[in-house]
Amino acid sequence: MRTAAVLPSSVGLAARMVAGVPERGEPVVVELGAGTGAFTSAIQERLRGRGRHVVVELNDRFAAEIARAYPSVEVVCDHAARLPALLAERGVGPVDVVVSGLPWIAYTGEPLLIESVARALAPDGVYTQFAYNWTRWAAPARRLVDGLRTEFEEVVTTMTVWRNLPPAMVYVARRPRAAQAAP
């Protein structure tokens, strides 16, 4: 239930998940639930040594492996629900992109997780979350999408990545409302 994946995400799904990472400048990217690093690798390729990449991973084995494989990535072994505090402790913010590999179940017990992500993002920030096609109609998925629509001005769904097992799509949320409400 905590990992929620039997196989690592495909290169195609990873490409869709990290499309919002700017190709220029020094972006701040936060990755939630890195797992075995499919999205981590794609983020690092896109950053090419620029910016700052922070991974929040609850599983200590996955966190240690990501830290070993990607020495330039700041790895935090903690719960994503603590995101605002974790970022504040490290002087991180505002965040340009949040890439979430968290399973839907992670949001069930943490209704404020989407709000926390929105508050961490810059006004023009982007949040990506993938979903397996067969789960997107389940109650937790519908609640997540409702939360995205509440916290972000724009929420779009990508086409299905059929070459992922199981097939998946990506929710792309832009322009957090929290950033606009801030003084």
Image: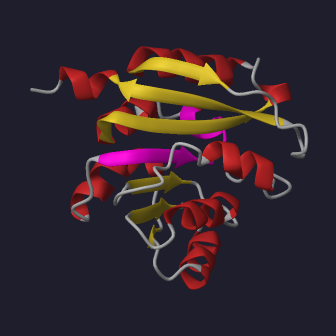
Q: Viewer-proximal residue, 1 or 124?
A: 124
The residue that appears at 66% across and 61% down in the rendered structure is: 35
Q: Quadrant of residue 160?
A: top right
Q: Quadrant of the C terminus?
A: top left
Say left or right for 165 vs 39. right
Q: Position of residue 114 (x, y in %)?
A: 44, 32
- Asked which quadrant contains residue 125, the reply is top left
Residue 102 visible from this viewpoint: no
169 shown above or below 145: below
Tell me where residue 179 sits by quadrant: top left
The correct choice, above or below, for 180 with respect to 12 in the image is: above
Highlighted range, magenta: 95-107
Magenta stretch containing residue 98, yes or no?
Answer: yes
- 25 relative to 88 in the view: left or right: right
Viewer-proximal residue among 98 and 42: 42
Q: Residue at x 41, y 56 (%)?
A: 24
